[in-house]
Amino acid sequence: MFGAFKPELDLPKTPVTFTYLILSQPRTGSTMISSSLQASGHAGVPVEYFNHEHLRKLPGPLSLASVHAYYTDVVSRRTSGNGVFGMKLHHDQFKPLFMKENAVMEAGAKFLRSFDRIILTSRRDKLAQAISQLTAYRSGNWNTSDRSLEGRQNYEFRKADVPIILTYLQDAFSGELFWDKICARLDLHPLRITYEDLSRSPEAELARVFKYLGLQVAPTAPQTVKLSRDNNREAKLRFLQEIGFENEA
């Protein structure tokens, strides 16, 4: 939906007075949050600026210095008129930049602590998260605001996909544990938002986000729609049967 290098998303240069960071994993509702914040006009343009596709476009070899220069440039272009800058960060985008031998480097700790507020998204139904990630990867459609596509991206289970789903399932659990450990270690206290609560009550959850960030404007309606109609219920049942789970109820 958004891009680091789209000039049409750049804003007039404004001094930064407040920053926030959305720590996330794929398929946890973070884009619903970030798109609503961006649409408000009061929360910058919270993109995955450290997305691998964006970083690959940087000139020269990737280093902390080049990433810092890129980040400084992004902040100068994507801060809204009220001085607010925000961004989104997946766990697999943080690790290659700021981790060494399973430990957070000083630069990584400094980066995380530089934000005034942190939001952390997760999803209780990890199997639905894994299947959703597989479906998005295959279709190339990670999110949309097109209402005509709501509920139309449903996955038809295939036995050959079991190892792939297990890989995404492992990533969903390890990603959540990773952010939990980082927040505990650095004494960060994020606002926690779950996909299920956001999906069930988007207006209420978005209002929590805006209040937490101190934005004195009403949240915009969700800018994205649910691509899956029922969290791929049938596919989840087929998967569980295939790995030998017996529902005794």
Image: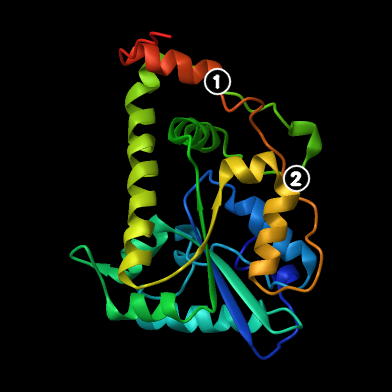
User: Residue 212, percent across and down?
Assistant: 64, 68
- Residue receiving disc 2: 145
Q: Is residue 13 above or below residue 124?
A: below
- Local SS, label 2: loop
The percent coordinates of residue 148 (x first, y second) are 80, 32
Closer to viewer: mark 2 or mark 1 = 1
Query: In which quadrant of the rendered view does residue 241 lie?
Result: top left
Residue at x-position 48% and y-position 34%: 125
Looking at this view, is 53 or 116 the one in front? 116
User: Looking at numbered disc 1 in the image, what kind of residue is underneath it?
Assistant: Arg
Q: Which residue is the site of mark 1?
A: 233
Residue 74 is left or right of residue 84, and the answer is left
Q: Secondary structure at mark 1?
A: helix
Q: Residues within 10 Å of mark 1 (few under 14, many from 20)?
A: some
Name the residue nearer the viewer: 51 or 211.
211
User: Given the current orientation, which residue lies at the most extreme front position?
Assistant: 249
Q: Is residue 156 visible?
A: no
* Image quarter of residue 211: bottom right
Q: Earlier in the sequence, mark 2 or mark 1?
A: 2
